Image (tube, rainbow, N blue to C red):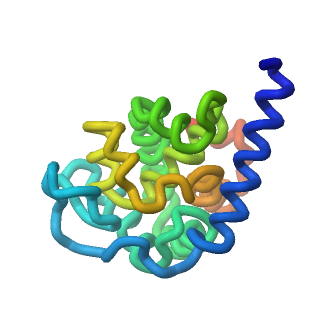
Amino acid sequence: MSAVDRLRAVAVACLVALCIGATAGCSGEPVQPVTAEAWVPGDGPPPYCSPSTAADADFWTIVHASCVIAQDGDVAQAEALRHLLDSYGTGRIERFHRSLVRLNHELAVASDVADDLCAPGLGLGDDLGTDYRSWVIAHGQSAYDAVLADPDVLRDFPDAELGCGLGEPFGAAALDLYLDRTGQGLDEAGLPLLAG
């Protein structure tokens, strides 16, 4: 398959995912019950918006707050995230973005499973893979930790295929707010990027 054919196939897969997401997966209604209880491995798919450990507690507190408002991992949740972050100082927004980038890169271990779910035989590539990992992070710490520990758990997410092509707005929310707040350009800010 040529590179052009592969790009066309990924584009078609993304359009299908976006169409499905627009009708089924992009609502404020939780796909799973939101819970404050930590997930126990082996108890099925992890609950969304749920804590796991104390690691990165400040980051996950903000993610969980956005998830409770709108659990789509995409546009609605990104708006909720930006609104929450807007009440914080610039330093906290920067720390949130840096944590998001680090956690997103660590989640790259799930790339093969995500590729299989979203674009079998083709793969998501760098940008769509990054967006999908942001979508997973938007589901909360238990979901993230479960996928990090065993990427195949992603297959048990009830909305795993609906996340294909989603997550970019959530992943960009903190960086966009930081740049707006500081008036800096991307090069001036010196912040790490999700893709690349």
Q: Position of residue 2 (x, y in %)?
A: 82, 18
- Residue 21 picture quarter: bottom right
Q: Nearer the viewer, residue 128 or 45?
A: 45
Q: Is residue 63 above or below residue 94?
A: below
Q: Residue at x 53, y 53 (%)?
A: 161
Q: Position of residue 105 (x, y in %)?
A: 46, 34
Quarter of the N terminus within the rendering: top right
Q: Is residue 52 left or right of residue 191?
A: left
Look at the image and tell me whether residue 82 can be seen: no
Look at the image and tell me whether residue 31 can be seen: yes
Q: Residue at x 45, y 59 (%)?
A: 138
Q: Residue at x 48, y 30 (%)?
A: 112
Q: Nearer the viewer, residue 4 or 109?
A: 4
Quarter of the C terminus within the rendering: top right
Q: Nearer the viewer, residue 148 or 12?
A: 12
- Residue 40 picture quarter: bottom left
Q: Is residue 144 left or right of residue 196?
A: left
Q: Is residue 90 left or right of residue 34?
A: right
Q: Is residue 51 left or right of residue 165?
A: left
Q: Position of residue 60 (x, y in %)?
A: 33, 59
The image shows a total of numbered marks equal to 0
Q: Position of residue 78 (x, y in %)?
A: 58, 66
Identity of the residue furthest to the right in this view: 4
Q: Residue at x 41, y 45 (%)?
A: 99
